[in-house]
Image (cartoon, helix red, strand yellow):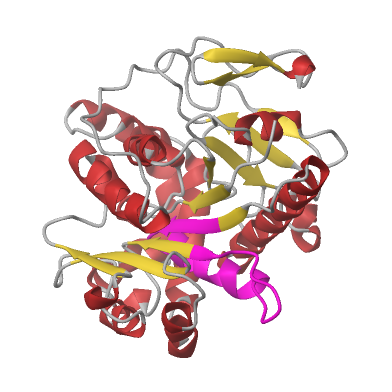
Amino acid sequence: MVPPKLLIICSCSFLSQGNPGLLGYYPHFLSHLHSLLPPSHAILATSHIGHSTRVPGPTVPLSLSQQVASKVELVEAIRGYLDDWALKEGQNKPKFSLMGHSVGAYMACEVMKEVNTEKARSVCAGYLLFPTLGWIADTWNGWTLWPIFHRPVKPLLPYLSPLLRPLFSLVNLPETSQSLLLSPAILKDVLSLSSDEMRQIRELDTEWFKAQGTDQAGESEGLFGVWTKGNGDGWVGKDGPLVQECLGGEISGRVKVLDGVPHAFCLTREHSEMVAGIVARWICPNGFRPETPSVPAEKPHHPLGSNIVPIRSTQPPFLLRAALSPPSPLVIDLQSAMPVKTSSVGASAGEMRCMDMLHDSTAEDDLGGLPGVGGVAVKGRRRDLEEL
């Protein structure tokens, strides 16, 4: 097995539902994007710590800076592992890109600032999807939803969530949203992070954004972004036009402004596939797979997250290697542990949680409970970990 040529880490954040970073909103987008990329490309997606209905979160909600720090730790850990793997196999080091939606795009930018230096660029490109990058409290949604992010409403909302169950039969909510609203612990983390975002996401570093559009070695490196036209995105304010200008506008090829596509693009198959096609062209401007009509995916045999397997840095990362070896599975969800400075809230440093996020319609085997015992579903066949 050889490492992938390009690894894309997707940081998800879905502000339209109160900012849970839950991957359950993204199956259509991520699976279609994967179908457009060469077999040598792999995708990993990371939820926010404490925002998973399957992975227990810390007892104390993480702040925005701690969430960013956890993603820096994850990127550096995987970057180091892939470099060592490539060296051992006599291969070129894989390229590394980040992608984020909404506040996930803000986090991706902060990670790039942290890990990239003048001497070395650990992350070659960033893809910003309807990004919330500045002055979030001054956006339309920031103003109208202000009460739920502050006292006295914010502390009460998690305890009211059980009362919402009878209402689900009257409204058409995604299953992911229903699971979120019925989890007081996750609601607490979501509201805590949202309050911190309102305070912290303000001034733009315009010089940094300009450098990401003009000082790049190739047309596929630097920052790229997708926005909604006009005032159609209630979570994007004056930061949108400013960042677009920094990147050179649509004429540069780095900016795409869509008419009628909402911030919550990932809720419909049509919008998910449209955005996936745009990102695929940026990633592989000369060689992505032609788009074909997608076939509705079969419902997973088991709930998302039912196959979580903990992997510690002291163990051989068999699952990660199996996942990233071309042809890769659709998506793997990785939740990094908190950094050392915040590890007292409940997770040991260096631990990652790995789960199969999107089941291939032909795959019937799930990840086993322990390395060396189970297998990983890869493109419809099972690879026993003992064979790796």
Q: Residue at x 36, y 50 (%)?
A: 280
- Using the image as rendered, state which of residue 22 and residue 331 is in the foreground: 331
Please indicate whether residue 274 sits to the left or right of residue 192 in the image.
Answer: left
Whether 235 is among the magenta residues is: no
Q: Is residue 239 above or below residue 127?
A: below
Please indicate whether residue 310 sits to the left or right of residue 148 in the image.
Answer: right
- Residue 236: which quarter of the image? bottom left
- Using the image as rendered, state which of residue 102 and residue 363 is in the foreground: 363
Q: Is residue 84 above or below residue 255?
A: above
- Using the image as rendered, state which of residue 295 and residue 59 is in the foreground: 295
Quadrant placement of the C terminus: top right
Residue extending furthest bottom?
207
Looking at the rendering, the stretch of residues picked out in magenta corresponds to: 97-125
Residue 123 x, y percent position in the rendering: 59, 64
- Is residue 320 visible in the rendered image? The answer is yes
Whether 99 is among the magenta residues is: yes
Q: Is residue 236 above or below residue 293?
A: below
- Is residue 233 visible in the rendered image? The answer is no
